[in-house]
């Protein structure tokens, strides 16, 4: 069970730290969207704040951001700016699926677990959640549902949706995405990619956006900004522009058309300029590796797997979790297994990693013997 919203005492016997605790980190390892806004993005917002501009995307900033995203893809993609990640997923999915169809994804997918049912509600489609394998969807998981195609009693598989990076912190390789796209396209399904952390995945794989999404055959994606240093906003990118025929109506109806779109656009342009988005992701991923090393060296901490991107999953003695959260908050991940999640961002610092690891050590020293 995953818990994002509340601190649940995991163990009746809490660790009581008696000695002096190190100062908690200045930043937060709770999530990458706990970080603030990158200074370059703030500067771009201020820069865009000169004079009037037509609303709803009829402005030079939106044109520039669209051109910058198309340049990354080297493709004539349709780009629609949205307010946020859930909304962008809703818009992308609702454009390509009918209420009598289904979206196949894994049971850990953000669209299933963390969006309060918004994709199901706004698309009217069935969301078919299959067991994940380390957060990933495997092509063979589609097979049982592909047999439903053409039978009027079953929801018709219409979309395969994957998250890159996955909610388990794993990263699909380019061949893995290609295999999923081949399996989906072979049966006429559309592939949607939730790229809330696409930059982290690109640097983890050492590849570029065109190779990862255009060449593999992804049809529509959410291009994530917020976790990469933006203040707000995400983009829906239709790699097959013909799929976007109804997209503008869907976006407006879903409440995802930003009136002053220039401010979302300016952030995209700022992040893409000089590969700032990739630098941010590289930094976050590197610090996740450092955090796993430092905290993993503390006796009693078990790092579930070496981080592939910017998430660290750790098992801790249950009694240490609540006091540690009070000292520097983070989310529990799997309460039954005493597993927690720590995330790094563009704003994380090495000093904070060291402080956090020192705090972990101090708290684990105080865990009462079993
Ligand atoms: C995988 C994934 N998709 C989408 C989102 C976007 O969500 P939000 O609507 O909070 O911007 C998130 C944010 O946590 C996420 O982790």
Image (cartoon, grey):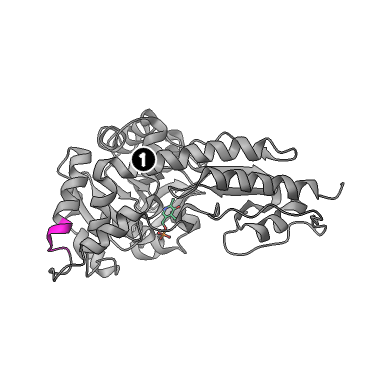
SS at badge 1: helix
Instruction: Provide residue 143's location: percent of width, then percent of height.
Output: 43, 37
Residue marked by disc 1? 279
Inspect this view and state whether residue 190 appears.
no
Residue range highlighted in magenta: 57-62
Q: Where is residue 188 in the image (x, y as percent from the top left)?
A: 28, 41
Q: Is residue 58 above or below residue 309?
A: below
Figure check: 48 above or below 142: below
Q: Which residue is at the front of the view, 257 or 344?
A: 344
* Residue shown at 47% from the left, 64% from the top: 116
The answer to whether one can see residue 75 in this image is: yes
Q: In which quarter of the view is residue 86 placed?
A: bottom left
- The answer to whether residue 332 is left or right of residue 114 is right
Number of residue marks: 1
Q: Which residue is drawn at 27% across and 56% down?
A: 267
User: Ligand 1 lies in which image quarter?
Assistant: bottom left
Q: Residues within 10 Å of mark 1 (few under 14, many from 20)?
A: some
37 on left or right of 3: left
Choose top left, top right, bottom left or bottom right for residue 8: bottom right
């Amino acid at each position: 069970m995953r818990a994002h919203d509340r601190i649940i005492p995991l163990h009746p016997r809490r660790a009581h730290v008696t000695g002096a605790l190190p100062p908690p980190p200045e930043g937060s390892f709770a999530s990458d969207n706990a970080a603030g806004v990158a200074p370059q993005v703030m500067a771009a917002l201020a820069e865009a704040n000169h004079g009037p501009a037509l609303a709803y995307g009829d402005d030079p900033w939106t044109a520039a951001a669209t051109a910058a995203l198309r340049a990354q893809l080297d493709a004539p993609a349709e780009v629609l700016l949205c307010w946020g990640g859930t909304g962008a997923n809703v818009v992308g999915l609702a454009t390509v699926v009918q209420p009598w169809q289904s979206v196949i994804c894994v049971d850990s997918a953000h669209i299933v677990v963390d969006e309060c049912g918004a994709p199901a509600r706004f698309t009217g489609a069935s969301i078919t959640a299959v067991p994940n394998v380390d957060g990933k969807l495997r092509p063979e998981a589609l097979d049982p549902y592909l047999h439903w195609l053409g039978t009027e009693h079953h929801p018709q598989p219409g979309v395969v949706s994957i998250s890159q990076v996955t909610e388990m912190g794993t990263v699909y390789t380019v061949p893995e995405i290609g295999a999923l796209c081949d399996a989906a396209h072979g049966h006429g399904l559309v592939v949607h990619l939730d790229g809330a952390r696409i930059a982290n995945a690109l640097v983890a794989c050492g590849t570029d956006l065109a190779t990862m999404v255009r060449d593999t055959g992804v049809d529509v994606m959410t291009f994530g900004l917020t976790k990469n240093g933006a203040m707000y906003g995400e983009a829906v990118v239709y790699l097959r522009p013909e799929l976007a025929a109804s997209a503008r109506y869907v976006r407006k109806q879903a409440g995802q058309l930003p009136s002053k779109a220039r401010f979302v656009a300016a952030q995209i342009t700022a992040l893409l300029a000089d590969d700032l988005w990739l630098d941010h992701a590289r930094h976050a991923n590197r610090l996740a590796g450092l955090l796993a090393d430092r905290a993993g060296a503390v006796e009693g901490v078990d790092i579930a797997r070496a981080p592939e991107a910017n998430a660290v999953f750790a098992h801790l003695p249950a009694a240490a979790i609540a006091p540690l959260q009070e000292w520097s908050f983070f989310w529990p991940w799997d309460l039954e297994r005493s597993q927690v999640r720590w995330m790094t961002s563009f704003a994380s610092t090495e000093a904070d990693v060291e402080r956090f690891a020192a705090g972990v050590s101090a708290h684990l020293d105080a865990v009462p013997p079993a």
